Amino acid sequence: MTQPALLSRRRGLCAVLLAGALPGLVRAQAASMSAGLSVTLADGRSRRFELAELQALPPESAPARRRDGAPFQVKGVSVTTLLKLAGLDLSANLGGGAVVGHALVARAADGYRAVWGLAVADPHFGHPPLIVSWSQPDGSPWTPKDGPLHLITTGESRPGRWVRQLVSLEVKAL
């Protein structure tokens, strides 16, 4: 087979393979961007919250600062509330030993992860709230790059642990 014929055949094969794989890749991306949040506790219990369910919860808000230092009010629902609804009631004063030996892992659709000690979500330790938000400060939805859900660490001056495209929260025993 001549070189041009071989190249033409390879291109045709690549086009066929790509055409077959592309719809699956698009579906996988759409599924990862679905507006829902999975919460898994250290004991294996889990709960999934769809966007409409999150929006129906009593709204919570807290002050936060952008990377440039501009203050804004973030609105959504706290991680503490979501953990309680999933079965871990941190407001029950479980005691330091039951909390400080655990980590909270937030995962994004693109694989990004951020980690906190679970005490950050326990109101008895006095930390500013971690807020799961579905809208920007002006009330408009997050852009596809940032949403549909965004986890904002309201007490940090540097937003390195803010998680855009949030898909899951997991409590892990250490």
Image: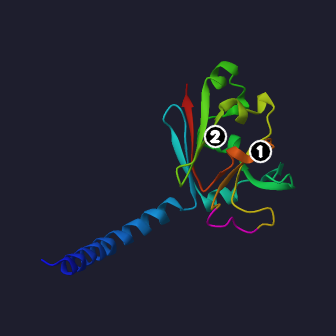
Q: Is residue 170 above or below residue 27?
A: above
Q: Position of residue 65 (x, y in %)?
A: 83, 50
Give the extent of the magenta segment: 140-145
Residue highlighted by disc 2: 83
| First in sequence: mark 2 vs mark 1 | 2
Residue at 60% in and 57% down: 165
Q: Amino acid at mark 2?
A: Leu
Q: Is residue 147 above or below residue 169?
A: below
Looking at the rendering, in which quadrant would you find the C terminus? top right
- Asked whether residue 106 is drawn in magenta, I would say no
Q: Amino acid at mark 1?
A: Arg
Q: Residues within 10 Å of mark 1 (few under 14, many from 20)?
A: some
Looking at the rendering, in which quadrant would you find the N terminus? bottom left
**Real-space CA distance between mark 2 and mark 1, rounded to the nearest whole angstrom:** 25 Å
Q: Residues within 10 Å of mark 2 (few under 14, many from 20)?
A: many
Q: Is residue 120 above or below residue 21?
A: above
- Asked whether residue 144 is drawn in magenta, I would say yes
- Which is nearer the eye, 7 or 155? 7
Q: Hey, which residue is sitting farthest top in the picture?
A: 97
Residue at 79% in and 54% down: 74
Residue highlighted by disc 1: 158
Q: Hey, which residue is sitting farthest front in the picture?
A: 3
Q: Position of residue 102 (x, y in %)?
A: 60, 28
Q: Secondary structure at mark 2?
A: helix
Q: Position of residue 108 (x, y in %)?
A: 57, 51
Q: Position of residue 158 (x, y in %)?
A: 77, 44
